[in-house]
Amino acid sequence: MYPVSEPNQQTARFGGGQQPGFQPPPFGGGQQGFPPFGGGQQGFPPFGGGQQQGGAPSSPPPSYTPQESPSLYAVDPGAIRGCLYRYTYVWLSNGSSFWYYPTYVGRDSIAGYRWRGYRWVYYGTDLRRIRSFRCS
């Protein structure tokens, strides 16, 4: 442990000096309103901004797979925003597809819950990776 000294010009300029009673937040622990590594937790979108109105759905998604209607354009945040808090089937450009329950749409990204066959898992991705989608 190093002895406590007066903040020098370097630490004062970059905020390295600590105020009495200051306790830094736990890094990546998901406590005190900070999301853990790998995405947000319930109530916190992983990419900052926005609000999440609830957690994962309490029931599984529909048991059918909808027909894909290919899109010739990139996915528009305004278009997919209409799917917030609704079961949405997503086709990614890498060929994978799955049921999704979006809870956050940003300018370039989306976050929510992805169905993994038996449970919902928090998942976020870049909108450019989405080939097409369909809300139920």
Image (tube, rainbow, N blue to C red):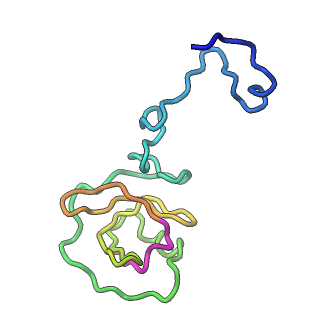
Q: What count of labels does the image hold? A: 0
Viewed as shown, does residue 124 lie left or right of 48? Answer: left
Q: Which residue occupies 31% across, 54% down?
A: 56
Q: Which residue occupies 44% across, 75% down?
A: 130
In-front residue for pair 54/101: 101
- Say if 129 sits above or below 16 in the image: below
Quadrant the N terminus occupies: top right
Residue 136, by quadrant, is bottom left
Q: Residue 131 colored magenta?
A: yes
Furthest residue toward top: 3
- Say if 127 sits above or below 9 in the image: below
Viewed as shown, does residue 17 lie left or right of 62? Answer: right
Furthest residue toward right: 9
Q: Which residue occupies 43% across, 80% down?
A: 131
Viewed as shown, does residue 16 lie left or right of 43? Answer: right
- Say if 20 sits above or below 130 in the image: above
Percent coordinates x, y for residue 65 in the rendering = 24, 79
Stretch of the chain drawn in magenta: 126-134
Viewed as shown, does residue 67 lie left or right of 94? Answer: left
Q: Residue 47 colored magenta?
A: no
Q: Which residue occupies 24% across, 66% down?
A: 61
Percent coordinates x, y for residue 99 in the rendering = 29, 69
Furthest residue toward front: 2
Residue 133, by quadrant, is bottom left
In-front residue for pair 63/115: 115
Percent coordinates x, y for residue 129 in the rendering = 46, 73
